[in-house]
Image (cartoon, rainbow, N blue to C red):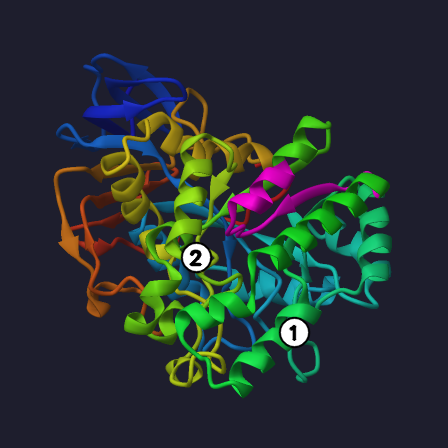
Amino acid sequence: MTYDLIIKNGNVVFYDEVRKADIGIKNEKIACIADKIDEEAAKTIDANGQYVMPGMIDTHVHISEPGRTEWEGFVTGSQALAAGGTTSYVEMPLNALPATTNKAALDLKIEAAKGKNYVDYSFYGGLIPGNIHQLEEQAKGGVKAFKCFISDCGSDIPEDFANVDDYTLYKGMQKLAELDQLLCIHAENPDITRRLAEDKMREGKTTGVDYAESRPIFTEVEAVKRAILFAKETGCKLHLVHISTSEAIQEILKAQREGQDVTVESCPHYFALSAEDVDAIGPKAKCQPPLRKKADQERLWDELLAGNIGWLTSDHSPCTWDLKDAPLFEAWGGISGCQNNVDLMFDLAVKQRNMPVEQFVHLIATNPSKRFNFPNKGEIALGKDADIIFVDPNQSYTLKSEDLYYKNKFSAYEGFDIGCRVTKTILRGNIVFDLNEGIVGEPKGKLMLENN
């Protein structure tokens, strides 16, 4: 056989082991895995002892096109994902305008994304007050899951997103259970967090630690428990996004032990940054849920290392600088981070805390591929899409704003010394990022629909 591409001499990260192997790629698929491949290929790449692993599947990304493309567009957002080692992503139903809460808005987004993505992509639908009758049309339109907020969300702008009340949550879960759809929830009690923030500002307490205290741990735990209770009552499949505390993780584990279909993700910023870091970094490090105090962060690390968190996502939530250039409590709450999912967490988890590389791959690729039903992705295995990244554990660099591909080139991680590098990203056998060349070629990303 003549292959389109052969990758040689890599430390290949499989589901349950790491070993030296060559990989042959044909027609965008992994066609051969062997100790040595001697056949011809149109192109051969020497991985030179780097880790060769499946590309990340980031199931929590905000691209603001159409409507707020000045925040982030498909071209710049997907370039950043590719440069960071992500080969597939699922895009949230906000912060574009109109928000993706009906079939017409979904069609607008699908059209806006055509020919602009450097990695494969798919979309969420949204659950908001008043749109339960529009959930089925979104599901039939091809969304991979649904998102709602038990938290403050939205604006006064027409067609923007909005958080759910308990009635909408209950009735929406009933409908999504009937449709066999997954509901992903941002869980914080908005009534309490809103009033506590007002108290802090009135008292002039506006540090990073004060912000964390305005959204205390119990407000996440209470909302998680409420979501789990509603899901149990309705039979809805549930996923809790960007969980920031061990206490909430323990509630999710309890529900899993009792047989509920519930999963959980967290994000690199909750492991890399703490509330005590916010004042030095500024509003670039503001997010919801907030960065937690160092002692709480260490307990979250314990959960991750113990295998109690399903997977990692970026919750890449960009905006223009003017929305960040404000006092902390008033600034936009979102971290631009998708370009540093893999390298930052590989350094922190694998290099610094001895997480097995196989476990790391489960966190970035294997587990989300299973939950979101991407059977052709998430693993180095025969017949899978050749979505492959190289990670060099022996390179290090200091992240600078000029390294970023975001439309608005700022990140909470600027100035970080990162102890590894993503050197190559391959999408279905096509090189889309190379450390020396940057972004390679034209956008080749495809819309991922059911069972692909």
Residue 48 x/y as whole percent: 13, 30
Q: Residue at x 67, y 50 (%)?
A: 224
Query: Could you say which disc has been placed on residue 268 in the image?
Result: none
How far is mark 2 from mark 1, CA to CA? Answer: 20 Å
Label 2 neighbourhood size at 10 Å, few (<14), some (14-19), many (20+)?
A: many
> Viewer-nearest of labels 2 and 1?
1
Q: Identify the disc placed on residue 98.
A: 1
- Give the residue number, with chain letter if any, for mark 2: 117
- In the image, 357 versus 181, the foreground residue is 357
Is 246 contained in the magenta span? yes
User: Which span is picked out in magenta?
Assistant: 234-252
Query: Can residue 27 be seen?
Result: no
Residue sitting at the far front: 203
Instruction: Look at the image and say whether residue 211 sits in the magenta stretch.
Output: no
Q: Are marks 2 and 1 in contact (CB under 8 Å)?
A: no
At x 41% / y 85%, what residue is drawn? 326
Q: Check disc 2 and report its element: helix, strand or loop.
A: loop
Q: Position of residue 310 (x, y in %)?
A: 52, 36
Q: Residues within 10 Å of mark 1 (few under 14, many from 20)?
A: many
Please state which of residues 401 and 76 is positioned toward the viewer in this rendering. 401
Q: Image point 62% across, 70% down: which residue?
A: 193
In this image, 96 relative to 331: left or right?
Answer: right
User: Label 1 amino acid?
Assistant: Pro
Q: Nearer the viewer, residue 22 or 407?
A: 407
Which of the 4 image quarters holds residue 117? bottom left
x then y, percent, for residue 437: 17, 54
Quadrant location of the N terminus in the rendered image? top left
Q: How many marks?
A: 2
Residue at left offset 34%, top offset 58%: 80
* First of labels 2, 1 by sequence position: 1
